[in-house]
Each structure stands twice: as structure tokens, then as C-alpha cells.
Image (cartoon, grey):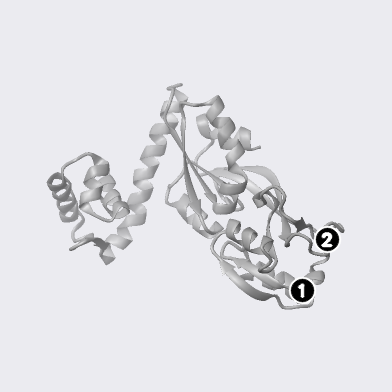
Amino acid sequence: MSLRQMEYFVTVVDAGSFTRAAEILHVTQPALSHQIKAFERHIGGPLLERLPRGVRLTPMGRAFLPHAEVAVRSAARAERAARAAAGVLGGELHVAAVHSVAAGLLPPVFARWRRERPGVELILHEYGRDEDLDDGMDRGVADLAVGHGGAGAAARVPLGDEEVVVVLPPGDPLVGGGPIALADLAGRDWIRCAMEPVVEGRPFIDLACERAGFAPRTAVRTEHTTTAVSMAAAGAGVAAVPSYALPPGTASVTLAPPWRRPLFAWSRTPLAGPAAALVDLLA
């Protein structure tokens, strides 16, 4: 069993077909198929079910995939780290983040990075929830993550606290009067986002509103923070989002007491080279 065979297997799964995987790997489809079959013989059973339009993992393939992903991606990270330590120019840096961080916090940092290090390409992996981000990092998807997790990581750097604000439509009577109590929103419709954190086994807004003496009335459920902001600004309900996710001019209010969460940058390996440089920019 070779690392190259594992790379072939992971690429076929990611691409969803032998044809597309062969194009990505710059090999012929017969050669790729031959390597996968040899790999399956070594493993002792089929990893992929060949379908008329793609492939599907077998139970053995599903069990093997996470370990293959870690091996392949760890090897790629090791190569990038070695090249960085040797001072080799160019290369790439893989960064993972939840969507709100990727859209609201990273753009100016990435823009400055491109001005200062144009030879190092940034590859962004976005996730809907912190749990998915943590799972992606466990599978070795990225060199560096930015978010709210990272407990137990080899390197974890605090970046400061994000403050959650409430988005309201322009002209709402609560706007402009200073911080509000959560109870002031009793009776309002809420825009709920799939990225809402879970605390004590419950969606955070449900728990917080209950403690404030009311149950939130959900009007709309969205997948992304940016959609929740647009919906709230249009008057479809109120939305609780990080302050950095707000476009300029968006009407919002802060809460008293404030809602804050710490942000971190973390890695499964000690920070070095481009990863350490990007953390310096973030901090």
C-alpha cells in the first residue's frame, strides 16, 4: 500500500468519478482504475462501488476514507512545512473557517497577505458549523483554522472576542438608543441561522431567550449568516450575528449584558512558515 494509491482513492471520492479524478491527477483513466483495483486487492475488499454515473463508497470504503484523508493531507502539509522552513518561495496555505468568519473577518486579512506575500496562494475551506470545521481539521483538510474551537490543538492562538449584535430593519425604534436587554425582543420574529452555536445541548438563542423569560418565535431559517443579515435588514425578523458580519450601514443594536465569544487560530501541528505569518496578521 502506497501513499500515492491512497491519494488516488481520496481523489476519486472527492471528484465523484474516475473520469474527473483522472483529469485532476493527470493520469489516464485505465491507469487510475488499475491502481485502485490493486489497492483494493491489498486492502482485502472493494472500497468503491462503480455506478453508471460515478462511484459510491462501500462500507469498507467508508471506514477507510477518514484515515486515508488524514494520511494524504498530512503528507501534503509536511511538504509545505518543509518547503517553508527551507525558505522556498511560493506554495500554498490551506485555511479553514466557518462561513461568517470567512466572509466577515478574513477578506481584509487575505487582501493584505496578497500584497505582502503574492507568491503564496491561499486556499479557503468554508464550513457551516463549528462542529464541521473541527471535523475537517481532524481529517487534515487545512493547515490553519480560524473559529471558536481548537481545544487540544498543537497550537492555538487567541485572536480576541467577537461580539454578537442584533440586526434590525432601518428605522426600528430600538435602533440608536444604546444597548438593549434581550427581553426587549420578546414578541419579535427571529431569523435563525444553521450556524447558531449549540450550548448545553440546545440552540443558543432558545436557551438565552428562555433565561430572559420568553420563547423566541422563529420566522425564517437560513443556512448562512449573510442571508440572515439580509433577511433581518429587510424586516423579516431580527437576527443575532457577529458584528464583523455586518455590511456598512446595517442597522443593529448591542445587548446588555453583551454576548461575546472568543476567537482562535489553531493548527494540528506547531505553527511555522506561512501559517505563523498569517496568524500574526490575524492577531
Q: What percent of the width, then of the height, locates residue 14?
A: 32, 53
Q: What percent of the width, then of the height, locates residue 196?
A: 61, 63
Q: Is residue 10 left or right of residue 38?
A: right
Give the answer, above or below, for where 90 lies relative to 47: above
Q: Is residue 279 left or right of residue 175?
A: left
Give the answer, above or below, for where 168 lies relative to 103: below
**Label 2 vs label 1, nearer the camera:** 2
Few, some or many residues within 10 Å of mark 1 (<14, 14–19, 20+):
few
The numbered mark, 2 or 1, whose residue comes first in the sequence reads 1
Q: Is residue 173 left or right of residue 101?
A: right
Give the answer, above or below, for where 46 lies relative to 72: below
Q: What percent of the width, then of the height, locates residue 72?
A: 34, 44
Q: Amino acid at mark 1?
A: Arg
Front in this rendered view, residue 165 or 132: 165
Residue contact at pointers 2 and 1, CB within 8 angstroms: no
Q: Which mark is residue 256?
A: 2
Q: CA distance from mark 2 to mark 1?
A: 14 Å
Residue 277 showing in the rendered view? no
Q: What percent of the width, then of the height, locates residue 229?
A: 64, 59
Front in this rendered view, residue 163 or 268: 163
Question: What's the residue at 25%, 49% (across, down)?
Answer: 20
Question: What's the residue at 77%, 75% (across, down)?
Answer: 186
Provide the residue designation for mark 1: 211
Front in this rendered view, residue 198 or 239: 239
Q: Amino acid at mark 2?
A: Ala
| Quarter of the rendering containing residue 4 | top left
| Quarter of the rendering containing residue 195 | bottom right
